[in-house]
Image: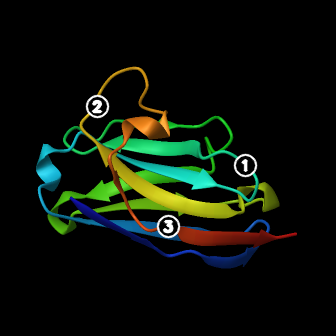
Amino acid sequence: VQLQAFGGGLVQAGGSLRLSCAASGRTFSRYLITWFRQAPGKDREFVAAISWSGGSSDYADSVKGRFTISKNNAENTVYLQMNSLKPEDTAVYYCASTDYSGSRRRDWTMYDYWGQGTLVTVSS
């Protein structure tokens, strides 16, 4: 599976961005597509996940109500719509994929395929 993330950029606080994660390869065998982010000097953290087959989603508390994850199976693409952005959302955003379906789905070490990352910068 190959993943390519894009759509990052510079936006003012309160603004919006939409990230895309384009998947290729044996995508239908994967269970989850997930967005993580990593700010300078901080650990990589879970943002949002979506089930490739059923479409169920999960969000970190810090983004719930502001971010929406969605997918287009026909285009093999997962999106992350980010609204009401805050300076603390500034980070490199990565999409990742896993077959794992257990309780550690928010743990980035459970993911074996990663996109290259896209930088989101939110100015105050």
Residue extending farthest right: 124
Amino acid beneath label 3? Gly
Q: Nearer the viewer, mark 1 or mark 2?
A: 1
- The residue depicted at 75 percent of the width and 69 percent of the height is 122
Instruction: Please determine whether, in this image, residue 78 is positioned above or below residue 49.
Output: below
Quarter of the picture containing the N terminus is: bottom left
Question: x, y percentage for residue 81?
Answer: 51, 61
Q: In this orientation, does residue 82 appear?
A: no
Q: Which mark is residue 100?
A: 2
Residue at label 1? 42
Q: Say whether disc 3 or disc 1 marks the residue closer to the N-terminus.
A: 1
Quick one: 95 or 40, which is closer to the camera? 40
Q: Earlier in the sequence, mark 3 or mark 2?
A: 2
Q: In the rendered structure, which amino acid carries the disc numbered 2?
A: Tyr
Look at the image and name its color scheme.
rainbow
Residue occupying image coordinates x 69% and y 79%: 10
Q: Amino acid at mark 1?
A: Lys
